[in-house]
């Protein structure tokens, strides 16, 4: 079995090398595409400069946080340095730093490729939808391949060097903590600019979405990159690492088949990356094709390839179980089903979006009310899907012995995230084509090109909503398995202390229920803090936009040679986002630590349960409602319900501005928050055993 595990370590490195080589090929292919419009090049350079400036300043702040966190880990985890093994603490701190660094690198490279692809996609749209789609998708695929490659590489190296899956929790916490703050900061930045640009431009002045007269349009395009590329990339890097880490922690705790189960986790991760490479390589669209259908078809192809490859591997390798394969297959298939239901609620070719667009004709109150209602309804299929996949995986693997039921759930999460390379490619495609649409308008490429870019952008919005639903659902399964990892870590500490082991969490226990109530409240407070950050920052930017329109002669009229001060809006978005990105995340971590030291492991079990259920519901609702409002607006802008400038259009813009921080700030940040508090709980479980007020 040890030789088999060594084989999979080697195959991990080989597959990562193939993925990186393919990503390099795609990058060079995108770079070779034609770009000659001087105005587009000028605006693209401004977007790239703004994104790099924000990322540089954000990473400086996060580096300070990571240094402090690493020092705390070095002193206290996995046990106080004066009581335990200093080398183990040093390994945990080093793994934490490695997780943050790899997550940051993936985000930085994603920004580089996205800002390279946007101008080329805009000019490709002049030739038609096919070349523009390929540029946008392949640009996004570079990010997808790098994120999954780095996650597999990091997990393999840490486990190979240390042999201790517990150290992987430190690596995962590094990825999660950076993802939490990167997603929050990027989300606040992008939605500050988006809301301000829409309210002042479309509602007040009646000018087009990406009119270069609007001082906020460059900040809006910068935000697409720092929020949806770097932020979502870090988020899904974190989810993938957390799923593998929790599965490996549980696998090593199982008796009688630990090496085979560890090998199986690596095998499935390798085949998932390989399936994504094949899916990306074969992605195509016809001359007059539908980009949404093309993106979805690529996902289905990748899914089929993964299922076939893992079935073959399960039949070939010693110690692999068909029950565990079934659990991973259920997780993946439920993920696809969740994607389909999310598409139904957010695609403008489906009835729900059109109903909200029609309701907008009666005013913004009806836009908001109908969108909120359908948003809540849309959460049900995903919640049921997560519940069913967890239940089926549990029951499938329960007969295998003690601990295997929870291991089955962890493999369902690994299965759901197995095609994450394709999922991230689809997600990163969204901001690239969104930027391309703005560049096409600012570069004066004509109405036909803008219509093509709009079609690509609408598909991007739908796929982004599907991706968010997929990542939130995967986070749900991951944190259920992290709850199993938490129990494994707690029981290790309890056994060392000579105390009774935990076999479950009784919600009738006042200690557990204390944790449930507090855990359920945290996602709501976390969301409120992020949305208030967007609100305060957007108000400042709206004032700056008004100042420029009032004080710069000829700007409002669009006089030739008169340009707004784009940098002022970028500075407002940057400073506000950096100011607001830390408090919400620290609140979540502080609440977890407080509950642990008050009520001990039992209270933390309840805390995680409440946090998972409340967080998943709020995240799914916000993500889907926001995507629904966004595409209702775009559907009206395509000419429905009176078209641009109509009463329905203005109401839909207001609905979209309400939904912006829902779908791009708070909603997708919650699943990272859930993962972070789960990892903090597992890492600090020995301290909660030893030092809680009510053990």
Image (cartoon, rainbow, N blue to C red):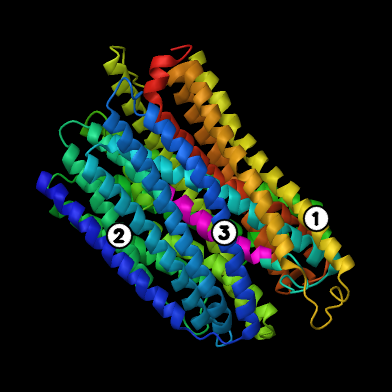
The residue lying at 25 percent from left, 43 percent from top is 159
Q: Which mark is residue 226?
A: 3
Residues tagged 2 and 3 counted as in contact (Cβ below 8 A): no
Q: Which mark is residue 364?
A: 1
Q: Is residue 170 left or right of residue 570?
A: left
Q: Main SS type for the magenta part? A: helix
User: First in sequence: mark 2 or mark 3?
Assistant: 3
Instruction: Write down the residue under mark 2.
Output: 306
What is the secondary structure assignment of the residue under circle 1? helix
Q: x%, y% of residue 14?
A: 22, 62
The residue lying at 48 percent from left, 17 percent from top is 599
Residues tagged 3 and 1 counted as in contact (Cβ below 8 A): no
> In terms of depth relative to the viewer, which is nearer, 408 or 270?
270
> In terms of depth relative to the viewer, which is nearer, 251 or 154?
154
Q: Is residue 594 left or right of residue 175?
A: right
Q: Residues within 10 Å of mark 1 (few under 14, many from 20)?
A: many
Question: Marks 3 and 1, Cα distance to the nearest angstrom?
Answer: 29 Å
Mark 3, mark 1: which one is toward the viewer? 3
In the rendered image, the vertical position of residue 288 relative to residue 238, given as above or below? below
Number of numbered discs = 3
Q: Residues in magenta?
A: 219-238
Question: Marks 2 and 3, Cα distance to the nearest angstrom?
Answer: 31 Å
In the rendered image, the vertical position of residue 385 relative to residue 84, given as above or below? below
Q: Residues within 10 Å of mark 3 (few under 14, many from 20)?
A: many
């Amino acid at each position: 079995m040890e030789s088999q595990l060594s084989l999979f370590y080697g195959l991990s490195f080989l597959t990562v090398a193939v993925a990186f080589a393919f990503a390099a090929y795609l990058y060079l292919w995108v770079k070779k595409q034609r770009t000659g419009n001087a105005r587009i090049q000028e605006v693209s350079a401004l977007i790239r400069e703004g994104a790099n400036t924000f990322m540089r300043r954000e990473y400086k702040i996060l580096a300070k946080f990571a240094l402090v966190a690493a020092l705390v880990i070095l002193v206290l985890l996995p046990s106080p340095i004066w009581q335990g093994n200093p080398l183990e603490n040093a390994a945990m701190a080093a793994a934490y730093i490695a997780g943050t660094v790899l997550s940051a690198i993936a985000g930085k490279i994603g920004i580089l490729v996205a800002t390279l692809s946007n101008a080329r996609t805009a000019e490709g749209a002049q030739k038609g939808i096919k070349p523009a789609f390929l540029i946008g998708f392949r640009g996004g695929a570079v990010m997808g391949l790098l994120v999954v490659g780095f996650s597999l590489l990091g997990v393999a190296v840490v486990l190979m060097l240390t042999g201790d899956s517990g150290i992987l929790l430190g690596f995962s916490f590094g990825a999660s903590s950076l993802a939490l703050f990167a997603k929050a900061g990027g989300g606040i930045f992008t939605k500050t600019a988006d809301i301000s640009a829409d309210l002042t431009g479309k509602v007040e002045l009646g000018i087009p979405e990406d009119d270069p007269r609007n001082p906020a349009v460059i900040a809006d395009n910068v935000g697409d990159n720092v929020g949806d590329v770097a932020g979502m990339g870090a988020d899904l890097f974190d989810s993938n690492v957390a799923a593998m880490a929790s599965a490996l922690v549980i696998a090593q705790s199982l008796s009688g088949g630990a090496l085979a189960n560890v090998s199986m986790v690596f095998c499935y991760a390798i085949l998932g990356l390989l399936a994504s490479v094949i899916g990306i390589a074969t992605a195509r669209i016809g001359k007059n094709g539908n980009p949404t259908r093309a993106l979805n078809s690529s996902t289905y192809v990748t899914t089929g390839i993964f299922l076939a490859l893992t079935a073959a591997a399960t039949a070939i390798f010693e110690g692999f179980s068909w029950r565990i394969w079934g659990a991973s297959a259920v997780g993946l298939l439920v993920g696809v089903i969740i994607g389909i239901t999310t598409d139904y609620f957010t695609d403008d070719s489906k009835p729900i979006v059109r109903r909200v667009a029609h309701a907008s004709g009666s005013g913004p109150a009806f836009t908001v009310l109908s969108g909120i209602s359908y948003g809540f309804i849309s959460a049900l299929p995903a919640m049921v899907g997560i519940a069913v996949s967890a239940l089926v995986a549990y029951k499938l693997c329960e007969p295998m012995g003690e601990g295997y039921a929870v291991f089955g759930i962890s493999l369902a999460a690994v299965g759901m995230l197995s095609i994450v390379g394709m999922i991230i490619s689809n997600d990163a495609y969204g901001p690239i084509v969104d930027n391309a649409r703005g560049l096409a308008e600012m570069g004066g490429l004509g109405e036909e090109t803008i219509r093509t870019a709009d079609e690509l952008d609408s598909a991007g919005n739908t796929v982004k909503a599907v991706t968010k639903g997929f990542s939130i659902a995967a986070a749900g399964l991951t944190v259920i398995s992290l709850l199993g990892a938490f129990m494994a870590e707690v029981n290790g500490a309890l056994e060392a202390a000579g105390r009774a082991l935990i076999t479950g969490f009784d919600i009738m226990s006042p200690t557990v229920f204390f944790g449930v109530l507090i855990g359920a409240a945290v996602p709501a407070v976390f969301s409120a803090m992020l949305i208030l950050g967007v609100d305060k920052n957007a108000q400042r930017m709206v004032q700056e936009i008004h100042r420029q329109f009032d004080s710069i002669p000829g700007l409002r009229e669009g006089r030739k040679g008169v340009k707004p001060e784009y940098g002022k809006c970028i500075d407002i978005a940057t400073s506000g986002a950096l100011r607001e990105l830390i408090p919400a995340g620290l609140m979540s971590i502080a609440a977890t630590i407080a509950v642990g030291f008050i009520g001990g492991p039992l209270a933390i079990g309840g805390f995680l349960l409440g946090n998972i259920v409340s967080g998943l519901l709020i995240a799914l609702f916000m993500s889907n409602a926001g995507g629904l409002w966004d595409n209702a607006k775009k559907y009206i802008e395509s000419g429905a319900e009176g078209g641009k400038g109509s009463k329905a259009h203005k109401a839909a813009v207001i609905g979209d501005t309400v939904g912006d921080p829902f779908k791009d700030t708070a909603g997708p940040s919650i699943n990272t928050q859930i993962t972070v508090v789960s990892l903090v709980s597992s890492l600090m479980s020995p301290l909660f055993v030893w030092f809680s007020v009510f053990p």
